[in-house]
Each structure stands twice: as C-alpha cells, then as structure tokens.
Amino acid sequence: MAKKAVLFDLDGTLWDSTAETTRAWNQTFAKCSDLPGFEMTVQTMAGLMGKTTAEIAACLLPQLPLSRAVEVIQLCCAEENAQLLRHGGKLYSGVQELFVQLAQLGGVYIVSNCETGYIEAFLQYYRALQPLVDGFLCAGETGRPKGENITALCARHHIDSAIYAGDTQSDLDAALFAGLPFIHAAYGFGTVDRPVPTARTPLDILPLAERLLAQ
C-alpha cells in the first residue's frame, strides 16, 4: 500500500509566533553594539516568516556585512527558541483536531525554513501534538532550500504520495519544485500567484487533503 502524507509549513500555517519572536529578537538587537537603537515590529516579523536565515539577514540588516548579519540572526533565533519553549506562540484553532484526523489518512510532517530547535520548541510547548507528528526537517539542519528539504523528507520516510500545505508564495514554489500538490493556508501571512486549493481555516485542509491524496 502506498504511504501517504501531508506536509506542513509551520509559521502562518500551524501557529503565529510573531509576538514572542519579535520580543526575543529585539532583546538580542539591544545587546549588539553595531545595531544601536535598532528595533523591529510584529508587522515586519510577519513579512519575514518563511524566509531562510540568510534571506532574513540580507533583507533586515543590509547595513551590516552579510556574515555579521547572519551571525546576529542566528543569535536572534537562539533567543527566540528559548522564549518559545517558555511561552509558545499562538496555535491556530483546529490544528490539533486536524492532525488527529489526518493520522487516519496518512503521516503528518513539518518542513520549515527555520533554524534548528524551532520546530522542537513548537512541539515541546504543544506536547499534545508530539505523537501526531511523524517527522520534520528544517533548513537549519540541512542548509538546503525548502523544495529540496521536502524531497529529502519524503525520501527519508519512504513517502509515496504527499501534499504540502503552506501560506506563502515561497511555500507554493517549494511544493512545485518537489512535484507535490499544494494547499494554500489563506489564513496565514501570505498570498500566492495562481489559483490553488485554498483553506480559510486549518480544518479546511482536511477535505482538500483527502481529495488530493485520493487522486
């Protein structure tokens, strides 16, 4: 029997951590002598969700050499993970029920552009989700773009048929690269450039996934 799975982006698809993440990053910036008075807003953070560390560094800190900017963002991510372990982000309503239902359909996995430790913090804070998630992979672990990580995760777990759910154009691009059908989490942070199956809430993903995986 073919092994089926639904793969998820994290930020803007399963939860919203922008408030805690912004707080953690601003605390880190305050300790950097080469960023006097630098602060960011929750709105700016929302626009960065889904990008890799290097992309964020180049976009957010163009006044610094790229190597230093990457170093600062990595420090931000470490502080972010520590704070999320304590305080968590906002889990979207229906995610746990969605995972329970999808477990009857196939595996549940997470593929994100985050640094190592971020998905772990998500699952540590929302412990009830741990037994419902069959695996995960992130850019911080591999240093590879999301499309390649989707392909790698499917190979690692011997997945024959999968779909990817995410909220941004980069998520759609990654799914296209990996050759997977895509579900747009329109309740998240971003938009996409073409008509695709669209979820207005997390629970909307269930019937879409059932239909796509049956094809």
Image (tube, rainbow, N blue to C red):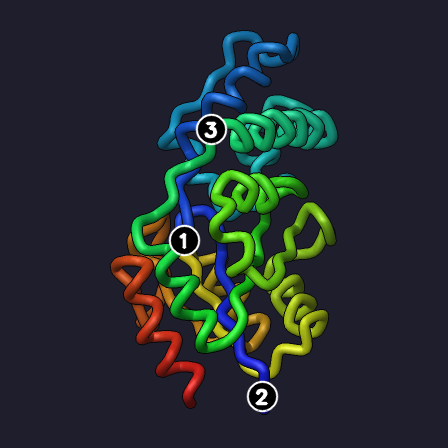
Q: Secondary structure at mark 1?
A: loop
Crowdedness of circle 2 by 10 Å Cα count: few (<14), some, many (20+)? few
The correct choice, above or below, for 175 with respect to 66 in the image is: below
Please name the residue shown 37% across and 62% down the image: 98
Residue 100 drawn at (x, y percent): 42, 64
Badge 3 or badge 1: first in the primary sequence: 1
Residue that label 2 marks: 2
**Nearer the observer, 139 or 158:** 158
Residue type pointed to by label 1: Thr
Please name the residue shown 48% across and 44% down the image: 126
Residue extending furthest left?
Answer: 200
Badge 1 or badge 2: first in the primary sequence: 2
| Quadrant position of residue 19 | top left
Please name the residue shown 28% across and 66% down the image: 204
Pointers 2 and 3 in contact (CB under 8 A)? no
Residue 34 seen in this snapshot: yes
The correct choice, above or below, for 5 with respect to 201 in the image is: below
Residue that label 1 marks: 13
| Quadrant position of residue 168 | bottom left
